[in-house]
Amino acid sequence: MQILAQVAFILALAIGIGIFIRNIRRMIRNIKVGREIDRTDNPSKRWGKMAKIALGQYKMVRRPVSGIVHVIVYVGFIIINIEVLEIIIDGIFGTHRIFSFAGTPYRFLIGAFEILALLVLVGVIIFWIRRNVLNIYRFKARELTKWPKNDANYILYFEMVLMSLFLIMNAADYQLQLNLAPHYAMANGEIAGAFPVSGFLLPLLDGFSDSTLVLIERTAWWLHILGILFFLNYLYYSKHLHILLAFPNVYYSKIKPKAEFDNIDAVTKEVQLMMDPDADPFAAPAEPEGEEAGEPEKFGASDVFDLNRVQLLNAYTCTECGRCTDQCPANNTGKLLSPRKIMMDTRDRLEAVGENINKNGKFVDDGKQLLDDHIQREEIWACTTCQMCIEACPVGIDPLSIIVEMRRYLMMEQSAGPADLNNALGNIENNGAPWPYNQMDRLNWATEN
Amino acid sequence: MAENIKVPTMAEYMAEGKQPEVLFWVGCSGSFDDRAKKITKAFVRLLNKANVDFAVLGTEESCTGDPAKRAGNEFLYQMQAAGNIEVLNGYEIKKIVTTCPHCFNIIKNEYPGLGGNYEVMHHTTFLKSLLEEGRLTVEGGKFKGKRITFHDPCYLGRGNDIYEAPRDLLRKLEVELVEMKRCKKDAMCCGAGGAQMFKEPEPGKEDVNVARTEQAIDVKPEVIAAGCPFCNTMMTDGVKAKNREDNIAVMDIAEMIASAEDL
């Protein structure tokens, strides 16, 4: 019986981790449909930023309520996972609390896990209330209905159940140890672990026989570890990948000034050619070298293939907290634009592309694209490029760069800018100012009254 | 009032074989917009007072390409940049000051990749350095004790992490500096950025500039201080939309200093 349980456990572990690895590999493959981008410069600054923002939660706590509760859940999550290590070893070898030989330090750890588990439980309940009871702007947006709304709640329910199972498991274990049940009680008569929280659950277990207690303890133990394995695999299908991706995402985030946009090198080459008095306008274009051969470069982005890999990583990292949208001036004044939706749309499209690749072996044109089929032009044109979304994001996502890439596509590939904007740009082209004034009048201010 | 300002051009300096200490990049707004021209002149009066050896490009200046770049027209931006860089490099310009955060950002951050490398300063930072060097003195004057709030321009504040220079200048004016709820890193945009200045807004329930002005009005200022000609326009329109133009002024910090000094 015992050996059967061990085999079942190892099987569950292998399947759970196996599927997880498959999904992560798919995710990496999907990210690689994007353009390459070099973000390996200045590693010390990048590590520092990652330590501060991802590990240190620096931006989270800029909003004290959700920030502090998040830190509790985050710390609880990481530390309680140390316990998972013991659970895995116990599961494989059929032992009971393998680390309990450590005595006092072990008791301290288990006691701390219990307190954290309780805090996480309380934190998650606060999060649930914020999402479902309180009237918080960023949780009421149009993109946060149906699946995204349910997804967020499922995660919260999940954590509630996991924490409850953990405490029930400990309570039953504690009672079994007190009852000096075989396999549970330690040979030296000491108690393995400390149970400052689950100790309060003992009255609920009053009068149960040892075999019932073992059943409760084993059921909670199994559900807990199977729940964790399920959650590990739920990540990829939910908004919750940020618990892993926040770290690489912050590392690869923009470290230049937020207002600095990249220059398109292909345009620079063309402009240089145009400005070069010695260039032969009738010369055949130079043979493209290496990888540049083939289709001419497309300007801007209309689909995920045109975005860079950091932008696609951003999409997978977004946990839909909506701090960007909450402070977006366009969104605040009722425009269609929501930076969070830009990220969600990008991920949805990337996932559709990924499914397409899973099915066909390679991407087969499905007649759809990110622009128009997911993101509307009205959203793209409402942006003021104020960079508030970048500043607000607690994990270093840059929705603005995607908006700008789509503007570039609309402007340079489609000539589809808003008419009044085109007028202003026409003026710049003709007379060097967005208004129709003569460049020769540029110094008139110095002499007029 | 007959203007009594000296505005030498680079062409004149070149003819005399001289190099100015700094080039004043006026920008399109500062050259053509009636409201912004007042900021330009106020800044020039301060430069004159501090005996700063400066010059402008005048008719050789052209749009930096900022609205084109933010709107997605990279070609037009790079054409403008190439032209400007040719002129600037031709005059061997080393240092540039500008009253427009958009010109500041694009020349400072985006021109270097195209061959234009200069030390670029926003006028608030430049004025602060003049004060520190003792070349300009500022006293409270008519703004002493007045309730003033500063609206951070996105391309100066969040975009380039400059928050303190404008505030330091306001403190020199001995004003009662009050901050809006959304300020510095969290400051809300005036609604002009990203080339929105040159197009009608998308449908919504309110204009961005009005929403931002309401936030400013909430802290009951006598003056909304600005550091960008576009913010200035947007906030001025916002104050008018709220019918508060009789008791709330929108002024650039350069104008405030010049006016405090009765220049």
Image (tube, rainbow, N blue to C red):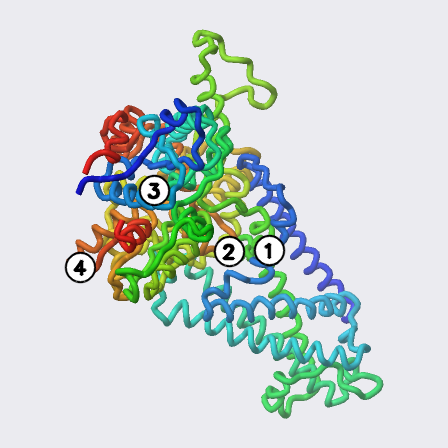
**Residue at horizontal 32%, vertical 41%?**
B44
Q: Earlier in the sequence, mark 1 or mark 2?
A: 2
| Foreground residue among B168 and A350 | B168
Residue under pointer 3:
B48
Mark 1: few, some, or many residues within 10 Å (few <14, many ≥20)? few
Q: Secondary structure at mark 2?
A: loop
Q: Position of residue B127 (x, y in %)?
A: 40, 49
Q: Are marks 3 and 2 on the same chain?
A: no
Q: Secondary structure at mark 3?
A: helix
Residue under pointer 1:
A244
**Residue at horizontal 31%, vertical 31%?**
A416
Report in which chain the residue with disc 1 lies: A
| Marks 3 and 4 in Cβ contact (< 8 Å) | no
Disc number for residue A238: 2
Q: Secondary structure at mark 1?
A: helix
Kind of residue sitting beneath label 2: Ser
